[in-house]
Image (tube, rainbow, N blue to C red):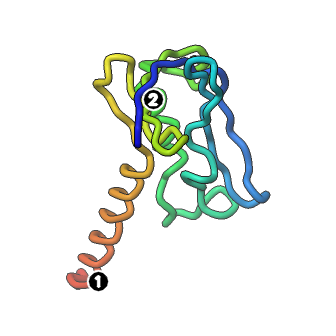
Amino acid sequence: MFMMEIGAIKAVHLYTYRRLYITAELELNLKGVKYTFGGHDVFLSGMHGGESADPPYLGRFLYRCMQVCRVDNWEELKNSKILAEIQHGKVVAIADTAGNNWFNPAQEFSAMDQERVQAESSLRENPKS
């Protein structure tokens, strides 16, 4: 079961998880109910902030949230209005209030991982001489 709700971003958080990883989340208010979007359940940076081979999840998350809300600064996200897709009690995607620019981190990060695996296998199959 899923539903859509319009709400506002009440706070933005960047924090370490288990003192090894960095993650970010938005704190949302949807009709008076507090939800979070992102965070360690959705993505983590590589250990100690990431190695060069780690996928850029943190940067992608920050960029896409700012893009959806049409802001140029992370702090400007606070009080931005969004449309949220809620599945099983969790916000899984956000969009602008018109529903035109959706960001679902699980889907986008999975696609990033698949592209990286394909690129790595292509390099292994066709090494440059």
Q: Position of residue 12 (x, y in %)?
A: 65, 29
Write down the quadrant of residue 34 in the picture.
top right
Left or right, residue 30 beside residue 82: right
Where residue 55 appears, x then y in whole percent?
47, 59
Q: Quadrant of residue 2?
A: top left
The residue labelled by disc 2 is 84
Position of residue 111 in the picture relative to residue 106 (left or right): left
Examine the image and state in which quarter residue 98 appears. Answer: top left
Q: Amino acid at mark 1?
A: Arg
Q: Amino acid at mark 2?
A: Ala
* x, y percent for residue 14: 68, 39
What's the distance in space between the residues labelled 1 and 2, CA to CA? Answer: 41 Å
Q: Which residue position is annotated with label 1? A: 124
Name the N-terminal-most of marks 1 and 2: 2
Please state which of the two labelled residues, at mark 1 or mark 2, is closer to the viewer.
Answer: 2
Dot 1, crowdedness within 10 Å: few (<14), some or many (≥20)? few
Residue at image location 33% in from the left, 74% down from the top: 120
Tell me if 69 is positioned left or right of 119 in this view: right
Please tell me which residue is depicted at 44% across the width and 46% down the height of the picture. Answer: 105
Estimate the x, y position of residue 70 in percent, counting from the top left. 42, 19
In this image, 51 relative to 112: left or right?
right
* Residue at image point 61% right, 38% down: 25
The quarter in which the C terminus is drawn is bottom left
